[in-house]
Image (cartoon, grey):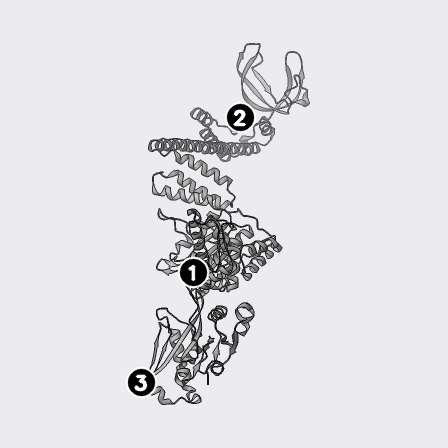
Amino acid sequence: MKNGQKLFLVTQKSVDIVKPTRDEVCDVGTVCEIKQLVKMPGGLVRVLVRGLERAVLKDFTVDDDMLAGDVVVTPNTEYTLPDSERDARISLLKEMMNRYYMETGRNQGENIARVNAISGLDEIVYTSLWECTTEYTERQDVLDMEDILMRFDEVCDIVCSEIEIVELKKNLSEEVRRRVDKNQKEYILHEQIHAIREELGEEDIEEETDEFRKAVDELDASDAVKDKIRREIKRYDSVSGSSSEAAVIRTYIETMLELPWNKRTEDNYDLKGVQKTLDDDHYGLKKVKERVVEFLAVRALNGKGESPIVCLVGPPGTGKTSIAASVARALNRRYVRVCLGGVRDEAEIRGHRKTYVGAMPGRIVDGLKNAGAANPLMLLDEIDKVGTDSRGDTASALLEVLDSAQNSAFRDHYIETPIDLSDVLFIATANDTSTIPKPLLDRMELIELNSYTAVEKFHIASEHLVHKQLEKNGLTHSQVSFTDDAIRKIIEKYTKEAGVRELERQIGAACRKAARFIVEGTKMSHKITVRNLSEYLGTPKYDGEDKPKKDAVGVVKGLAWTSVGGTTLDVEAVVMKGKGGLVLTGKLGDVMKESAQVALGYIRSVAKGYGIKDEIFEKNDIHLHVPEGAVPKDGPSAGITITLAMLSALTGRKVSHDTAMTGEVTLHGQVLPIGGLKEKLLAASLAGMKNVLIPDKNKKDLAEIETEITENLNICPVKTMNDVVKAALRQ
């Protein structure tokens, strides 16, 4: 203060040293002028200085009072620059500093005015460097630079960096503020919604959504499914609980949560155990059991295997539906029955779209939900009775379900998310495949369940039906029992069917009659025999068919297949005066009427060989009748029967009364193969026929027919009508 108020300030490299040496301070410092000196409490002094010139330290000495040193002031070289360049640099740095002050908001007016008043390049460089919040090392680096242009460029970079940092901090601060405001706004809105719902009595929605979210977190499903449910929960949380839309969304969420997305039961790979379970539950049905065991064997080898779509085809009461439940139990799979009889709306299969309050998933998805597993055994019952109308083609909707190449991503209109049906074991049932569309039939493996023989019915009744009906009616084997002959008589005299449904009903009727006697105390123990069977079931319903006792002209016994099994078919023909017409009666179908026309055409072509004159056809009418005129009849397999009846009537030759026949005929007298051979032979056996004429091309089917059906029949294969005439027409 006494020596011109000058001071030299230089940076010390380490703050821990009290008395540094020359090497412990920097080389370049600043010559300053002391502007203010204030003594502080505790012996401290605060000094305010103003920098004047840049100087280089040569050396200094240390004594008790102060540090004294030799410095060399560096010359100011800014005036060596052209005035225009110097002024441009000063102006640029001023603009940058003005922007810096505006961005930081630090005493904008005062600082901007002070910077704008500076006229020197060196001064504006040092002032700008001082205003920035840089580290002291960076400032020292600028001070060490000899060239003023280098110092200018470095300071410009520092100021630009400071401006960018300030802008970034400002943007981040704005983003944080927006987030806080948004969260605060959402919190306020949620509180308002909560208050409104409390007023409306809808506070349960929040509890429901919390439960839904917790259930989604615990759900074993893919991320896509979970995201879909979460979006619906968010929608549900934002709608009014009393609106119809809320009911639709809530039902949808509950359905999605109940579906077994990845939940599966473990298959039972004990093939012997499966076979035993199937044998215990059902008598016969060999092909069905073999197919199930084969499916399990494939799964056991490769771990997956394509689930087959099996279609069980056969008359009612042959065990198609009950075998499916037995298969499910044997495989350790959940059992679901989907009845398709009479279904006409496509939405019943694919589900309804969520556009109205009554929307619901289709029967397939609903079956999965009820099963609680993604790999159940699903029974598609009565698939041949699926209908079609203006609301869509239901059979076509089933194509995706039953196609193993497509059902891994089955889309239900209600669920709107692909569902994997590849692990579902589908078993369909049908009485007649002729009503199933060909594309749908092509996707299924057909297994026929033919009519039961009397022996098979006996085993089924004695091993299963009697025990089932006793248990159903609250009886024990000690209270009610059936003799073997009684069961055989029920089969022969009280039932006439392909399956065993009526047989079970008759056994149940006998059990109910016995139960009444036991409750009344009339008789406590009942042994049902052939002699007392009429006391429980009344008089027999069937005494056997009235078969012809002797040969007759124009009467032929035919064989027919129906949806309830095989039956015999009497065909009668007479020749009467007329004008050469053909009269057909008996409610015949179009195919059967054409068979009659074909028969007449064939007979006229070979009339001379049988001694039939042409004038007979011109002066007479032929009347063909099939008894039981109220029952519709159709099919080509009565061709040889109709032909032989006409030929017998025209020639007057008698037909063997103990011969039955089946086969389609051509105009040239060839006999074509037919279907349902087992049922037809069984009907012939029950009717007491001795001889049966079948097409020669059906001989291969005899290997699959039980010997108990064929042992009492003389089966004669025929190739042409000549063979039929030789075998059945008397001389």
Q: Give the quarter of the figure containing the N terminus.
A: top right
Secondary structure at numbered mark 2? helix
* Residue occupying image coordinates x 41% and y 85%: 651
- Foreground: disc 3 or disc 1: 3
Between 573 and 427, which is closer to the camera in this rendering? 573
Q: Which residue is mark 1?
A: 396
Q: Amino acid at mark 2?
A: Trp
Q: Which residue is mark 3?
A: 579
* Residue ranking furthest to the top: 42
Q: Which residue is mark 2?
A: 130
- Foreground: disc 1 or disc 2: 1
Secondary structure at numbered mark 1? helix
Secondary structure at numbered mark 3? loop
Question: In the displayed structure, would residue 370 be above or below residue 486?
Answer: above
Disc 3 crowd rating (10 Å Cα; few below 14, some 14-19, many 20+) is: few
* Residue occupying image coordinates x 53% and y 75%: 714
Confirm whether residue 412 shows in the render: no
- Asked if the residue at tag 2 contacts the one at tag 1, i.e. Cβ–Cβ closer than 8 Å, the answer is no
Position of residue 115 measured from the top left corner of the image (x, y, whole percent): 47, 27
Position of residue 577 measured from the top left corner of the image (x, y, whole percent): 32, 85
Q: Label 3, label 1: how many angstroms apart (C-alpha)?
A: 51 Å
Between 76 and 392, which is closer to the camera in this rendering? 392
